Amino acid sequence: MIQKKLSVKNRRAVSNIIGSLIVLAIVASVGSVILFQGLNQINTFNHDLSFYDKAKNAKLQENLIFEHVRFDNSTVRDVEIYLANIGTVEATVSTVVMIHIESQELILAWETTNSTGDIFTPIQIDQNQKITLTADLACPSPSPVPSLPDCVTAEWDDPYYRDSEYRISITTSRGNFVPTIATPWNT
């Protein structure tokens, strides 16, 4: 019996607790290396993606709204368009198109590449801008009364234009399209 006690006492081995701690230390060190490598790769991918798609991201952040459209009869054919930038980047108007809905007549077609070289200043974030353009109003028809002269210059006050709706479309330099429909009620 004495020998049995000696044999158990003389046995040299690693206890279960010490063995578990050693395995845990190895797994934690290898796992942290793998985790940090993975996080580094994800950060590199996101950084590269932000440079690749910068223009598209700016396009998505651009947002203009029409605040007001005024058909100015005091200057015969002017249209005042009030725009507000509610996006998170500045916006520049590149084209303005107005169509007489009933006749599909092109009343106004303005773009930055026209012969006058007009260009609007960018509309800053949370700012607004007034754009004044002159419409090309054609005389709708000859005068129905022979004693009256034919139309020389049409105005917003003419019934043909006053009682109609107009589709106004604005395109920005980034390619966003902003439409609205307006009626010259204030002529």
Image (cartoon, rainbow, N blue to C red):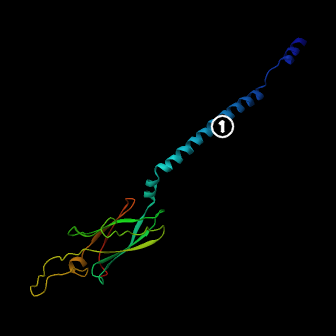
Which residue lies at the image location 56% right of the left edge and 41% below the top edge? 41
Labels in figure, total: 1
In the current view of this chain or complex, which residue is farthest to the right?
2
Residue type, label 1: Ser
> Which of the 4 image quarters holds residue 26?
top right
Q: What element does badge 1 sit on? A: helix
User: Left of 58 or right of it: where is 70?
Assistant: left
Quadrant of the image containing the N terminus: top right
Place of residue 123 in the rendered image (x, y in percent of width and height, measured from the top left) = 44, 68
Res. 40 in view: yes
> Which of the 4 image quarters holds residue 166?
bottom left
Place of residue 142 in the rendered image (x, y in percent of width and height, measured from the top left) = 13, 79
Q: Is residue 105 above or below residue 22?
A: below
Label 1: how many residues lie within 10 Å, few (<14), some (14-19) or many (20+)? few
Which residue lies at the image location 77% right of the left edge and 28% below the top edge? 18
- The residue identified by callout 1 is 32
Which residue lies at the image location 47% right of the left edge and 68% below the top edge? 124
